[in-house]
Image (spheres, rainbow, N blue to C red):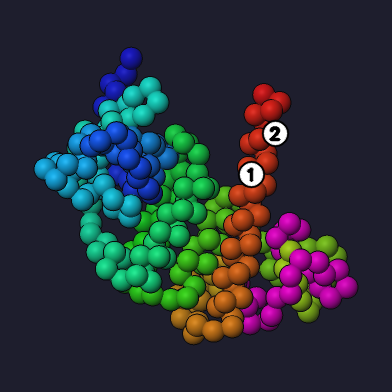
Amino acid sequence: MANPLYRDTAVVLRTYRLGEADRIVVLLTEHHGKVRAVAKGVRKTTSRFGARLEPLSHVRLLLYQGRELDIVSQAESVETLAPLVVDLDHLTSGLAMLEAVDQMTMEREPVPHVYRMLVGALRTVATRSGALVVPAFYWKLLASEGVRPELDVCVRCGDEGPLVALDVAEGGTLCRACRTGVPITPAALDVMRMILGGRMNEALATAPGAVTHEVAAHATRALEHHLERRLRTVAMFESHG
Ligand SMILES: [Zn+2]
């Protein structure tokens, strides 16, 4: 057997209790994908891990590979994302991102691009707030999974518009004649083009209001649609496998 010890950096996605003193930490690692590991004694006040294994922690780890659960052997902080944890808005945004990543990733399937995207987004959240930080992250996460909506023409007839609706099941925007899904305003469409077209700073500068609400609603709907479809696919494989 290969050396069961390995090093990686990770963001703690969530934790849950295991027995009296231990905790299971769900990690998105840079090179090993999502990993579930036991942190022994972490709930004792004298724990050698301190508070380094809380959700949102960015840590460098030494792990021992187990059959089902790995074991955290060492953990040190890579950086402190403290502003995240002291400000409730920032904290809520950070936790929403962790949840989306947890739902979008499979165990032990390396997704270094998602890891990098998450670390970048958490740094953004730690330094600036904004109504679109989380929705923009959802869209980028979906795009990284190959779910990038068409926003320039009607997905059904190819017409350039005006584009008046967004249907995530159809894969993008629709013209007046073909419209299904939900209405989309020209302003929200502009912001979505900024997010997915590499003009993130411009998008994040959008003043909070009707447009940011609308973009957030589209992003949540798209993420939920993708997750439901994936759950159905997994269920189908399991029942036929
Ligand atoms: Zn059309």
Are discs 2 and 1 less than 8 Å apart at CB?
Answer: no
Is 37 one of the magenta-colored residues?
no
Q: Position of residue 6 (x, y in %)?
A: 28, 31
- Label 2: few (<14), some or many (≥20) within 10 Å? few
CB at disc 2 and ligand 1 closer than 8 Å: no
Name the amino acid type tagged 2.
Met
Q: Position of residue 194 (x, y in %)?
A: 56, 73
Q: SS class of the residue under badge 2?
A: helix
Bounds of the magenta segment: 168-193
Task: In the displayed orientation, state which residue is furthest to the top.
Answer: 1
Q: Is residue 99 left or right of residue 222?
A: left
Q: Is residue 59 above or below residue 164?
A: above
Q: Which of these two is toward me, 20 or 234? A: 20
Task: In the displayed orientation, state which residue is furthest to the right.
Answer: 177
Q: Is residue 167 left or right of residue 176?
A: left
Quadrant containing the N terminus is top left
Identify the residue under disc 1: 230
Q: Which of these two is toward me, 205 or 161? A: 205
Camera sees residue 197: no
Q: Is residue 147 left or right of residue 55?
A: right
The residue lying at 83 percent from left, 62 percent from top is 156
Q: Which of these two is toward me, 20 or 169? A: 20
Quadrant containing the C terminus is top right
Q: Is residue 3 above or below residue 8?
A: above
Task: In the displayed orientation, state which residue is furthest to the left.
Answer: 46
Name the amino acid type tagged 1.
Arg
Identify the residue under disc 2: 236
Q: Position of residue 196 (x, y in %)?
A: 57, 66
- Cα distance, mark 2 to mark 1? 10 Å
Q: Earlier in the sequence, mark 2 or mark 1?
A: 1
The residue lying at 68 percent from left, 41 percent from top is 232
